[in-house]
């Protein structure tokens, strides 16, 4: 288990403090996607669907595969910020089904925006920041803790057609 430092943050009153939560690594997903399907220009911006075709994941005491059939209904807003909105399912090696609804933001730096406009993808990690907030649906049982916590994720794009998501529990 990876823990990221916990600090005390002092409020205006010397007698009150708020704890900064720990981040505990929970799982890493390696998701395969296919070429986007352009929905086109919408009132919010440019929308594209990225079909999810498979992949794998490994977590705290469980692992398995990403099931084909989900998608990320991605929106590039008029201000250039990308909005992720993905729904897909995982199947553990033990046969447990996990549904995920993952929303997030993709922010490109100036050079990243220029390269993306020229059709360059994926970009080097220093050209973007992508974070998400996965929400899990699971049946009652050994993985029910997944539905009882808040999670954040760090998203990277190591190669064309690949999305990696490191998920952390706020503890």
Image: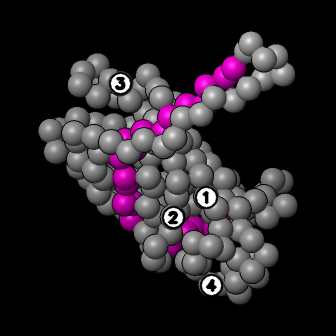
Number of marks in the rendered image: 4
Whether residue 22 is in magenta: the answer is yes
Which residue is more in the foreground, 47 or 28?
Answer: 28
The answer to which of marks 2 and 4 sits earlier in the sequence is: 4
Q: Residues within 10 Å of mark 4 (few under 14, many from 20)?
A: few
Q: Give the residue at mark 2.
A: 156
| Apparent side of residue 59 relative to residue 36 in the rendered image (left or right) | left
Q: Give the residue at mark 1.
A: 130
The answer to which of marks 2 and 1 sits earlier in the sequence is: 1
Q: Measuring from the top left, give residue 166's x and y in whole percent.
A: 44, 52
Q: Do the residues labelled 3 and 2 touch (CB within 8 Å)?
A: no
Between circles 3 and 4, the one closer to the viewer is 3
The alpha-carbon separation of the residues under discs 2 and 1 comes to: 7 Å
| Apparent side of residue 58 relative to residue 4 in the rendered image (left or right) | left
Residue 65 in sight in this render: yes
| Apparent side of residue 6 relative to residue 66 in the rendered image (left or right) | right
Circle 3: element type:
helix
Q: Residue at x 44, y 46 (%)?
A: 167
> Residue 117 appears in which quarter of the rendering?
bottom right
Q: Are marks 2 and 1 in contact (CB under 8 Å)?
A: yes
Q: Give the residue at mark 3.
A: 145
Q: Are marks 1 and 4 in contact (CB under 8 Å)?
A: no
The alpha-carbon separation of the residues under discs 2 and 4 comes to: 15 Å
Q: Measuring from the top left, give residue 105's x and y in whole percent.
A: 66, 53
Q: Are marks 3 and 4 in contact (CB under 8 Å)?
A: no
Whether residue 121 is in magenta: the answer is no
Q: How crowded is mark 2: few (under 14 residues within 10 Å), some or many (20 or more)?
A: many
């Amino acid at each position: 288990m990876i823990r990221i430092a916990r600090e005390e943050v002092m409020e205006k009153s010397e007698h009150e403090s708020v704890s900064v939560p720990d981040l505990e690594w929970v799982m890493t997903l390696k998701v395969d996607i296919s070429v986007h399907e352009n929905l086109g220009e919408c009132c919010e911006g440019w929308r594209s669907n990225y079909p999810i075709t498979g992949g794998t994941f490994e977590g705290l005491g469980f692992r398995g595969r990403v099931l084909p059939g989900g998608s990320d209904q991605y929106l590039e807003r008029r201000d250039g910020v990308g909005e992720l909105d993905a729904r897909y399912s995982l199947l553990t090696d033990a046969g447990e089904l996990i549904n995920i609804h993952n929303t997030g933001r993709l922010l490109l730096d100036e050079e990243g925006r220029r390269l993306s406009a020229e059709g360059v993808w994926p970009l080097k990690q220093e050209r973007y920041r992508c974070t998400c907030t996965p929400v899990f649906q699971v049946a009652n049982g050994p993985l029910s803790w997944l539905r009882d916590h808040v999670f954040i994720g760090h998203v990277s794009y190591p190669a064309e057609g690949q999305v990696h998501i490191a998920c952390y529990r706020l503890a």
